[in-house]
Amino acid sequence: MPLIQVRGVDHYYEWIRSPAADKSKPVMIFLHGWAGSGRYWESTAKALADNFDCLLYDMRGFGRSRLPLPEAIADAPTLTYELEEFADDLAELLNALQLGRIYLNAHSMGASVATLFLNRYPEKVEKAILTCSGIFEYDEKAFAAFHKFGGYVVKFRPRWLGKIPLADIFFMKRFLHRPLPRAVSKAFLDDFLLADYEAALGTIFTSVSKEASEVMPQEFAKLSVPTLLVSGEYDLIIPAEMGRQAAALSEKVEYALIPNTAHFPMLEDAETYLQKVQEFLGVKSEFN
């Protein structure tokens, strides 16, 4: 399993390249969402591999990027679960892999991390795609209820849940408008059950917070890197209108709505998603 140390934590990563390797290809890095892993980007990366060397990696505390025991990183920098910290993790990953200017494709919480990264390190990115991202207004009661519910969800995740028939279908129901293959849904549930408790809980509080509701509109407005923001028409997690409002804050951001999809448009309607992405990037995918 390929691992690379970033700020004291071993991060899982893998390359997806076309068989006809071309050293001149640009690099596209994929960022996953909350409690997920890079593996749900695999089909998208394979479709774009003729034009890009695609790098998938699992963010700290998620997927296969397991957090070490505290005593194992006694001399490492103190890391928090602020989204800015994950943006800095990405910058360190680029340095560790000796990568230059990249393309970035990010989803959900990963798209928030990517937005912060774009403004902190604009010189490192050629173009970016933000999938299922947006801005929201602060609601004290709603946020408190969400944090309380999220805490229960993160705390009570018995591993045996993954062995219950159809558990993955029920788990993914809120995220989808179109069903996914069972193997894909099961992988999502497995990643959720595997996510580190502190990382999963910490990012709930930093992603959905009063500070985030104030900071993220400013971050979208500052974007200077050409960016495509993609929403799913029936997304209940980050409604399309939130994405539309975010895209309108910067002239550098184009907006695309994928009909009849929800929170995973790249999987629910891969062909339409890739068409929008390739038009933005000026490349062709395997669907052409």
Image: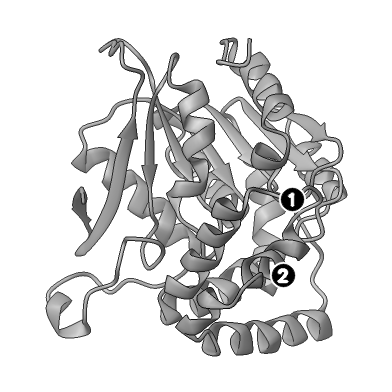
- 198 relative position to 187: left or right: left
**Pointer 1: residues within 10 angstroms few (<14), some, or many (20+)?**
some
Residue assigned mark 2? 170
- 117 relative position to 170: left or right: left
Q: Is residue 138 above or below residue 83?
A: below
Q: Sequence order check: which comes first, mark 1 or mark 2?
A: 2
What kind of residue is marked 2?
A: Phe
Which residue is at 60% across, 10% downward?
Answer: 282
**Pointer 2: residues within 10 angstroms few (<14), some, or many (20+)?**
few
Q: Is residue 126 visible?
A: no
Q: In this view, does 200 lie above or below 116?
A: below
* Cα separation between marks 1 and 2: 11 Å
Which residue is at 64% across, 82% downward?
Answer: 150
* Label at residue 165: none
| Residue sticking out furthest to the front | 165
Name the secondary structure under disc 1: loop
- The one nearer the camera, 122 or 61, is 61
Q: Position of residue 228 (x, y in %)?
A: 67, 30
What kind of residue is marked 1?
A: Pro
Q: Is residue 99 visible?
A: yes
Q: Is residue 252 above or below residue 201?
A: above
- 150 relative position to 45: left or right: right
Which residue is at 38% across, 54% downward?
Answer: 58
- The one nearer the camera, 51 or 124, is 51
Q: Position of residue 208 (x, y in %)?
A: 67, 70
Name the secondary structure under disc 2: helix
Which residue is at 38% across, 18% downward?
Answer: 26
Q: In which quarter of the image is the C terminus?
A: top right
Q: Where is residue 74 in the image (x, y as percent from the top left)?
A: 14, 80
Residue assigned mark 1? 179
Q: How is the image coloured?
A: one colour
